[in-house]
Amino acid sequence: MSEDSVLSPRNAWFRRAVGVTAGIFVATALGGFVLLPYAQPDLKVAGLWDAICSAAGVVRTPSAQAPAEPDARLTKVVVTSALPATPAPDAIGRGATLAQQCAICHGPTGVSRADSPNLAGQYAAAIYKQLMDFKTGARVNAVMTPFAKDLSERDMQDLASYYAFLPRLPGYHPVQEKPAPRIVINGAPMRGIAPCGSCHGALDNKTGSPWLEGQPAAYVKAQLFAFASGERRNDISQQMRNIARRMTPEEIQLASEWYASQPSTTIHTN
Amino acid sequence: MLTSRRLILAHFWLAFAVFGFALVLGAWQMFVRSPLHTWISNPEWYYRSLTAHGTVMGYVFPTLVAMGFGYAISEVSLGRPLVGRRWAWAGFWLIAVGAVMAMIPVALGRASVLYTFYPPLIGNPFYYLGIVLVVVGSWIWVALMSINLRVWKRDNPGVAVPLPMFANVAGSYLWAWTAVGAALELLLQILPVAFGLRSTIDAGLSRVFFSWTLHAIVYFWLMPTYIAYYTIVPRAIGGKIYSDTMARISFILFLVVAMPIGMHHTFADPQVGAGFKFIHSAFTALVALPTLLTVFTICASVEIAARMRGGRGPFGWIGALPWSNPIMMAVAFSFVMLGFGGAGGLVNMSYQLDSSIHNTQWITGHFHLIFGGAIVIMYFAIAYDLWPHLTGRAMRDLRLMRVQLWLWFVGMIVTTFPWHWVGILGMPRRMAYYDYADPAIAPQALSVALSAVGGFILLASGLLFILVLLRAQRAPREDAGAYRFAAALHPPVLTPALNSYALWIALMVGLTVTNYGFPIAQLALRQDTSVPAVYVGADP
Amino acid sequence: MTVEDHDIDAARVAERVERRWATLSIAIIVVLAGAAAFAGIHKATMPQARVETVEPQTIHLSGEFTEANLGSAAEPDGSVTVRAVGQQYSFTPQCMVVPVDTPVLFRATSPDVVHGFLIQGTNVNTMLVPGYVSQIPARFSRTGDHLMPCQEFCGVGHEGMWAKVKVVTRDEFLRMSAGNRRVACVD
């Protein structure tokens, strides 16, 4: 009963097993690669070879559909986990110098006294993306736009690195022991609202999204209303507008105030 | 001849301990997402728990049972002490360490990616490393089973391999090859990204790799159960195996066709060609064959036992069966659940029917019924049957055992039947909560609540099971005699093809190449299908 | 008749019964697989015919899935194409409109992780895998609303990822699409 004798065409089991297996494979392959493509109503096959290729899943080059008129207010930034590019060795130092002009609004330590967003410890990807959007005009603000216009790619990367490097100091916002509102923790599934916390801190973070804890309530609220009205559109494929549009004014108020009241050291995902 | 009792007991105890832990998580999940509970105050905990439940129940628990049972089979059926016991302990510890290593990041919320991994979601690398260790530990078992059989064959030329060992080694080879898909995904794709060496991953390719593992792993889970059907049940109820040949053919069929069918898990995926979906669908139908053969052989074997006990008439013999015997009850429950689960499986195998239930709660209902129901209830039976021989102590809690099996059966039906139903209604899987107040979802509330009740029945049964084992461990010493497996009605005739694996492994690998080769090669060679990783619970 | 003869006879009987059962099992499987293949080819939906790729991180910059191109488009041949994006954690458009009794083609993709595209009460059910375009034909025979949950775990916000599909009369769809390149409903 040596195994070699089984693995030989002289063995009846071998002949039968290989024959049946091959037979089933050939039959199903004929069905899948020839019969099926010709029977598919939405597939226009250009001959047998094309039928086989389509059924095998040979990749087709993406269709280049002409886009509609470009909207200047949509972002041009590509957000991935590799954003921004690896900083230069002197990025933080250079960023610190550049950041002096930002201190009036965003505070000398990146903590604002003027209802502008706190930037200390903010994710580099989030800062970089917003600077880029201000520069291209996808996001417009009377104060920010002129500053951003003159920033180079390197400037924006260095600013992002510098602010990301700063420690997340507690802001000037009172720390309160309030339970998180439902909209932050649970969202509203039937309105298609995921929890705020699943992208902006408290539950998890999504690349490109800022963390919001300790941010001024007035700022967060204004941005949510801007997203809801469509005034602000630099979120990729409407990901924020989808949410803000369906939030009630009360929910916007609650979420903004709760985030503002949270100590900015509460970071769950870092 | 059971000489490695400590080794086997260690495997079973670790298996049932992690099973108990994951069962508690499972019941909790059923409860918090049901209308009986308000929305959970941190949805992330739900996904954490789900990751732990799936990882333990899918990778750790059944692997340990298969390994422990495999060592017992090797010693008993070959009648000689295990060769390589030290290696076996090494495998055991690899699994124990791997399980703990995987669970730590999960518990910390840094690997909530679910046991199916789902790249480009990427969690903490130690989660994946832990799973790799579990798989490596189980591969030691595969090697040991192969070596033990080889040593025995060398000393017993011309003798048919005992059926339990033949099936056991077939199962181990199936697992060795099945695990390769997920191993490739973990080692070549996920771990480099998790460690930050690369920042992109081909999500489509990893789904194809995972389907290689995901379906056949079910047959690996199934192996101990089928071995118990054939070689424990007839003996336990006083009968014989109807057909040794049929049994071997069934296990061979599992070995050959369990694996190259996994793409029915990717029916709805855009990265796989329709032709390959068709082929895999047809081969999936084929895998029903060994189950149908088994159903016949086991029913015939049970009938033999009934008639030997004086059963008469075309159906009258059913009454003559030893219904108070826990093994008899377990196999009956198992067959009922296998029947329902198998019928559901026929729905999943067809592309068209699958499209109405794909990734809904139907799927979760289906694999809980098959795995948690039909398969795990036989794990209980295996433990009950082996325990007195492993501990050398009496096992007298027959009533408790019967209650436990009844609870498991009822609990599984109460859990999974409503689960299937809400799946047909379109309820998606794996959400931490649902808005049952919405009129479109409200009709599902009652079914989900019922499911949650079933979950608690299962929990009660599982805890009772562990209690029975614990009590038996403290019972008075008693010699249970030599452990033996069922004998065949007609002694096996030595057929080389039914006593060796080379041909069947060749066919298994060959079918993998034909059914998976092109889809994998195409996606692996293309550069433009890699997408940026999305890290969860870690530094972005 | 000796005892051995009897044994051999019994073994033969057993083998015959086995063979019959095996034949029956194979017949069952052939019938089932045949029925599935027949239904697939003649009656119901089929798997996506071609594999198409798309670069996920730039879909918002150019090509078919830019923001202005999402939503329902009336095609010259009378059919409707609906283009959608599923992303963490919403679908865009969040509310899709399709006319009743009209061939509809859904084309969708994901820019980040794997999502699911399931329209409740129909057999429209596919995966969105980043890097690939999913395409699925449909035809709605009744007007009304359908829920459209993401059916694949996509991260912590997965439970909040629900969209809607509104099936309207053909007249209403015509009214909505008059003067609009793309149609979606906001509610």
Image: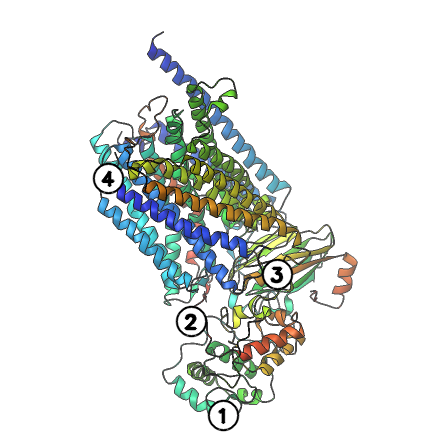
Label 3 sits on residue: C162
On the question of residue B124 being in view, the answer is: yes
Query: Which numbered tag is attached to residue B82?
Result: 4
Q: Using the numbered discs, state the Cα–Cα distance from disc 2 to disc 4 in whole angstroms.
A: 47 Å
**Type of residue at label 3?**
Trp
**Type of residue at label 1?**
Gln
- Front position among marks 2 and 1: 2
Quadrant showing the N terminus of chain C? top left
Q: Using the numbered discs, state the Cα–Cα distance from disc 1 to disc 3 in whole angstroms.
A: 43 Å
Q: Position of residue A137 (x, y in %)?
A: 59, 82
Q: Are marks 2 and 1 on the same chain?
A: no
Q: Position of residue B36 (x, y in %)?
A: 58, 55
Identify the element where label 1 is drawn. Answer: helix
Neighbor class of circle 2 (other Cα within 10 Å; few <14, some 14-19, many 20+) is: few
Q: Give the mark nearer the N terminus: 2 vs 4.
A: 4
Label 1 sits on residue: A101
Label 2 sits on residue: B539
